[in-house]
Amino acid sequence: MPTQLFEHIIAANQVMQSQASAGRYFPITLARLGALTRDWALSGGVASESRRLRNPRRTDVTARLLVLLRPGRDVTVYSLPTDVDPGWGEHAVTRALEVLNKWKGEPAEHVDGRSRRILVSLHGRSQLRVLDERLKFARRKFGAGEGLSSSRKPKVTSRSVKELATADL
């Protein structure tokens, strides 16, 4: 019984942190996301931390980003604008998670200075586009114009994006 109460508190806290921005909504709930990705090997910590609902950054809004998977680490579902029909939005995200199912078992990259993300975005109204984004980055050196706070932030040295697949809705 105490374990169930603890899990309920974690889930409620996660939902409270995941608030859609003004003019946006989440197409699925965190519980539904957890059910759809139950057998995925994600090691982002506690189960609710490896499954997230987030608002896209301003640069991602134009791309209509739906889902992001960092293999072996976490999966994130992004909010959609309110002009997108909620039923259609839920169908699109569910289909995106089905497409990402192919990469669910890939191990996490534990190489310093490298990162991999698999992104699923809307391409028109009837197609999903799956992209593999790989980043290489380096730590900045303190001094030479870099302050203490900016020297801790990694600097992207190269970025490659490759289309993995397209899928119909």
Image (cartoon, rainbow, N blue to C red):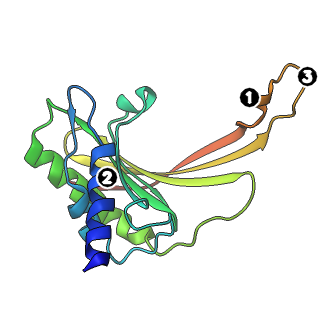
The residue lying furthest to the front in this view is 2
Q: Alpha-carbon distance for marks 2 and 3?
A: 42 Å
Q: In what element is the residue under mark 1?
A: helix
Q: Where is residue 118 drawn, in percent x and y?
A: 47, 55
How dense is the environment of label 3, judged by Cα within 10 Å: few (below 14), some, or many (20 and up)? few
Give amino acid for label 1.
Ser
Q: Where is residue 135 drawn, in percent x and y?
A: 65, 47
Q: Where is residue 81 drawn, in percent x and y?
A: 21, 32
Residue 5 or 118: which is nearer the viewer? 5
Q: In what element is the residue under mark 2?
A: helix
Give amino acid for label 2.
Asn
Residue 35, quarter of the rendered image = bottom left
Residue 145, relative to residue 69: is it above or below? Answer: above
Residue annotated with mark 1: 150
Residue 102, quarter of the rendered image = bottom left
Residue 120, relative to residue 140: is it above or below? Answer: below
Q: Residue at x 87, y 31 (%)?
A: 142
The residue lying furthest to the right in this view is 144
How dense is the environment of label 1, judged by Cα within 10 Å: few (below 14), some, or many (20 and up)? some
Residue 90, relative to residue 74: is it above or below? Answer: above
Residue 23, relative to residue 109: is it above or below? Answer: above
**Left or right for 168, reference 43:** left
The residue lying furthest to the top in this view is 145
Q: Where is residue 160 drawn, in percent x and y?
A: 62, 45
Residue annotated with mark 2: 13
Q: Alpha-carbon distance for marks 3 and 1?
A: 12 Å
